[in-house]
Amino acid sequence: MTPTSFSRRVCRRIPVTPAARSGRPLSSVRLPAVLASALVLGLAGGIPRAKAAELPLVRVVLSSAGLAQFVHAGTVEGGTNVELSVRLDQVDDVLKSLTVLDREGAVGPVGLPGKTPLAELFRDLPFGPDALKSPTALLDALVGAEIEIAGPVAAKGRVFRVVPETVTLPDGGGTTTRHRVSLMTEQGLVQAVLEDVTTLRFTDPETRAQIARALGGVAENRAKERRTLSVGFLGQGRRPVALGYVVAAPVWKTSYRLVLPKDGGTARLQGWAVVENLTGGDWKNIELTLVSGNPVALKQPLYTPVMAERTEVPVATGTKIVPRSDDAAAGGVRRKAASGRLPNRRADTMRAMPQSLEAAPYAPALAAPPQMPDVLAAAGGAAAEEAATQLLYRFPEKISLATGHTMMVPFVDRAVKATRTWIFQPDVAARHPLAAVRVVNDGDSGLPAGIVTAYEGGSANGGSAGALDFVGDARLPLVPRGAEKSVTFALDTRTDIRREDLGVKRTSLGKIVDGVLTVTARSRRTMVYEITPPAGEDRAIVIEEPRIDGWTPVAEKGAQEKRIEETPTRVRLAVTAPKGETTKASLVLERTDLEIVRLTDLAPEQIFAQMRGLDNESPALRAAVQKLGTLVGEITRTEAKRSELAAERRKIADDQARLRQNLTAVGAGTDLGRRYLDTLKAQEDRLATIDRTDDALEAEAAKTRQAARDLVQQLTL
């Protein structure tokens, strides 16, 4: 059963009920059939396992996203249940994703104990779990219950008390503890040693039933971290069914072998998947599918009781009002028919047995392509399929894997186009390039990311295994179908590269129309390289520099052997370095910034600053800038004079404040007072002169600024 066919089946949505294993028959309510949602992925660290022999594990689909699909399939008899043992921390996932497939019958409820079954069980019993630790603890917990004992003392009555007592053993054998039970009988209080009693029976049937329930619950929930789901199958007769579910699982890891022949452009790529079985159960002759993708994986606490909050209102008195019930409040819920059952589905939804319950056909193993070096043994590859959002690899042979074990399975084995190259990454190695190979995925499906072990040796004409030489490890990124990726595996110390960053050179070009200045600033950053390959070998070097937002590479004219390529994070410059000589190359990055300024809105000083330094100055502009500089100089001198007058004005104001204070102290009729008055008069005359001079300077400055604006308004560049 393939995941694709699994998703196409007609199946039934499973209602989960809190039914315990009480032996009661399952409900006969038929459920509406629904289509199973996409690929179901499954369990890790303890997958649910069908206890019934007729529903063995038949399929495992492992995802690189940390999910897995598990499918059990077989035949069942109508009216029976199938049990699945589930790890407690994975019950939420099973409740979310469990899908039941049945062709002819109907799916009954799926029951399982509550999240804390023992706590719920003892909540309704007159004693707690500690009462089952010993007979003494049980009798203490059931004081007042009627019992009947036999032995040295035979009596029937209600438990009054159980008291421990220390008894000395004969012949110096030490001491022991015995328990004396007291019964209130019709004849009075009767005592007996509990350890001497041969028979003790609770006479009340209800008490015996409560003790039996408690013992049965403890036995059923002996595995504290597991829960058992019971899936009911209604109808008559035997028929094939299947169960599928999704839970977390270890991701499967990818490991590649890449063999680089010395005499050709075709390499051999062999991919292996590392698979782990941590389910707690053996996989025996199961169909294995690997999925590489990133599906949306959600969690929800479906197994945790959730109580809705209610608003508490104060108690009110008055006329009692009973509102009418709103039958439409449960909108979307189908009402039961008079018989107590939901309306039956049409029989045609159950006619065809889903093909996925039968043995799924597999594509034949991939054959070795022509010109593939046979220094590696051929691996039985998987049949690859590329879906809209993921890659699938289905294995042609069934596998077995014991729990707790790890295995490697090959999923790809084919020839790929490969071109040797050397990549220079200054941030990785400052003086030497990395040996690499450019791989072209010309297959029918993408290649998932994984670690690569690279070998060198062999040829398209064959070779021996001993001819392989390890050259390094690498990382292969995800390679979509038809894409190219570089794989770096070693440092090439025989090739020397010197790199020099010449820095940034800025050029500003201006344009002035109607007083509006448009400045185009071009910044060029240049890196130069000197490449010295080995004396007897050519080198195809790819220089990689970080890609910076706003900067774009500039191709040099006439450099036929150089090629520039951009990736989301890198700028690449391809350079051919012939053997026996030093090759020079350069990478130029350019940035263009545009600034628009309305000069007439600026002060002359700011206008002068904006226009200075343009690299495309014309003679007319140069003369205008010079004249503007003269005007700015006049404005500067005028403002300087005004600043001096302002300083003098402040000094006179401070002095006058002092003189007026002194005049108040000595009086205006004294000689000193008259001197103060004369000084104040002279200062007032000076302040009047300062104001007249400042007004004239301000008018002169305004006239000069207007001349500057008129000059700028007439400029054209």
Image (cartoon, rainbow, N blue to C red):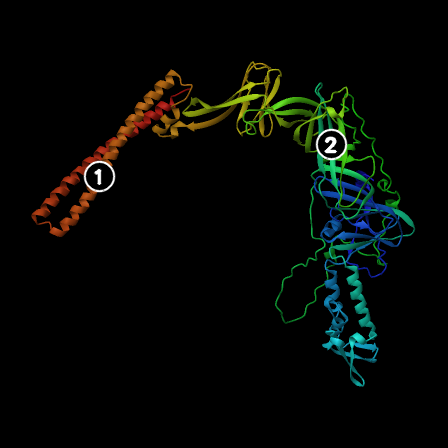
Q: Residues within 10 Å of mark 1 (few under 14, many from 20)?
A: some
Q: Which of marks 2 and 1 is nearer the N terminus?
A: 2
Across and down, in percent, residue 161 comes to 74, 78
Which residue is at 89% across, 44% downward?
351
Which residue is at 90% across, 47% downward?
239
Residue 143 visible? The answer is: no
Across and down, in percent, residue 108 comes to 83, 54
Apparent side of residue 686 relative to residue 481 in the rendered image (left or right)? left
Residue sticking out furthest to the right? 237
Which residue is at 69% across, 23% downward?
418
Tag nearer the camera, 2 or 1:
2
Quarter of the rendering containing residue 288 = top right
Apparent side of residue 382 relative to residue 580 in the rendered image (left or right)? right
Between 447 and 481, the one lying in front of the other is: 447
Q: From the image, tell me which residue sits under label 1.
A: 649
Q: From the image, tell me which residue sits under label 2.
A: 271
Between 688 and 461, the one lying in front of the other is: 461
Q: What residue type is labelled 2?
A: Gly
Which residue is at 76% across, 35% downward?
392
Across and down, in percent, residue 645 comes to 23, 35
Q: Which amino acid does label 1 sit on?
A: Arg
- Tag 1, which secondary structure? helix
